[in-house]
Image (spheres, rainbow, N blue to C red):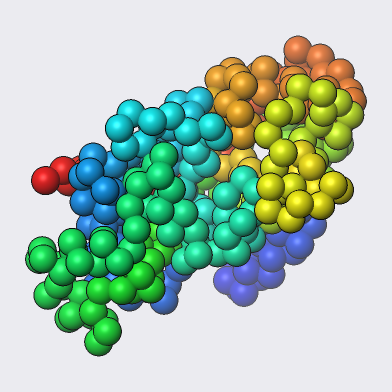
């Protein structure tokens, strides 16, 4: 019988050969902050008119987004870019499609202060929350009480828990060769050999670099992407590469939500990014692989509306 250490080294040797790595759960979490952050995430009082919570557009049991082309904020206002999933977002190198937030802590203010989304401001939000049960709850965790920083810190601590673990593909990477079907394995090999892996790799299978959308043809791209942040001509049509984890749960696809069909999304990527034609059989196999990226969804919750 082989020593357990053999299996550890065997698994590590398998992972070293692959451009994708399994998700590792956070073990150093502040549980009181997690519980406070979860309550805030589901609380519509964080919006100006008490109608929109973070969870309104990031529905945990729906894949961390809302399955809409564009989300709706206060007063029924419609946004102009597809809401990305919050699941596994802590593993992204930047936040938002254009990467304007360097981390989740910096990202929190975006939706809260956006006039189309939650339409609030932190000075008034802090006054509002200090009139509720939150005053005591924050004081028990943070010596400074309710501030922009402590609100963000608590929500981020909760978002660290929103990891989708135990995906069939992760089990496969960790040595369980029975975790994937032959078709799914063939799809993964095509995913690598066709060039998809050049942008979609790492723990989140994306989320770790910028890439131009429409490398071959950008004529149909209206949103300017990273250019809106840097104002540099070379950054036009560059976006943060989205994570492909749980992609089968997060339709519609792309920053502009142009299709809800995963097969069509694969075809679009082949044409616009790679300048290649994928056969129907190729697309079917790649889709099967992508579906193996669905992990176990974190426990959801109910939005609190006062």
Q: Residue at x 60, y 19 (%)?
A: 259
Q: Residue at x 23, y 79 (%)?
A: 145
* Res 154 seen here: no
Image quadrant of residue 27? Answer: bottom left
- Going by the image, does 164 lie left or right of 255? left
Nearest the eye: 282 or 141: 141
Q: Is residue 188 left or right of residue 100?
A: right
Q: Is residue 171 visible?
A: yes
Q: Left or right? Give the position of 14 relative to 156.
A: right
Q: Is residue 53 above or below residue 13?
A: above
Identified at 49% across, 43% down, the residue is 85
**In terms of depth relative to the viewer, which is nearer, 88 or 113?**
113
Q: Position of residue 30 (x, y in %)?
A: 33, 75
Q: Quadrant of the N terminus?
A: bottom right
**Residue 121 placement (x, y as % from top left):** 34, 58
Q: Is residue 124 above or below residue 72?
A: below
Residue at screen point 86% across, 26% down: 217
Q: Locate residue 74, reporting x and y percent.
A: 31, 37
């Amino acid at each position: 019988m082989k020593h357990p250490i053999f299996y550890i080294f065997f698994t590590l040797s398998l992972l070293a050969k692959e451009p994708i790595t399994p998700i590792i759960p956070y073990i150093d979490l502040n549980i009181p902050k997690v519980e406070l952050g979860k309550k805030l995430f589901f609380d519509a009082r964080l919006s100006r008119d008490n109608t929109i919570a973070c969870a309104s557009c990031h529905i945990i049991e729906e894949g961390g987004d809302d399955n809409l082309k564009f989300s709706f904020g206060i007063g029924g206002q419609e946004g102009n870019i597809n809401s990305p999933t919050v699941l596994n977002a802590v593993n992204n190198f930047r936040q938002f499609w254009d990467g304007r937030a360097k981390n989740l802590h910096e990202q929190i203010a975006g939706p809260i202060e956006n006039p189309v989304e939650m339409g609030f401001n932190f000075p008034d939000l802090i006054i509002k929350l200090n009139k509720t049960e939150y005053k005591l709850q924050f004081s028990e965790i943070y010596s400074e009480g309710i501030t922009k920083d402590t609100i963000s810190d608590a929500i981020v601590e909760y978002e660290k828990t929103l990891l989708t673990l135990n995906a069939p593909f992760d089990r496969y990477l960790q040595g369980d060769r029975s975790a994937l079907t032959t078709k799914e394995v063939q799809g993964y090999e095509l995913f690598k050999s066709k060039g998809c892996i050049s942008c979609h790799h790492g723990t989140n299978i994306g989320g770790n670099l910028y890439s131009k959308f429409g490398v071959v043809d950008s004529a149909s791209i209206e949103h300017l992407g990273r250019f809106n942040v840097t104002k540099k001509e070379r950054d036009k049509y560059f976006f943060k590469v989205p994570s492909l984890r749980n992609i089968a749960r997060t339709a519609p696809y792309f920053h502009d939500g142009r299709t809800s069909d995963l097969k069509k999304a694969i075809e679009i990527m082949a044409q616009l990014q790679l300048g290649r034609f994928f056969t129907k059989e190729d697309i079917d196999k790649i889709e099967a692989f992508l579906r193996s990226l669905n992990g176990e969804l974190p426990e959801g919750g109910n939005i609190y509306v006062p």
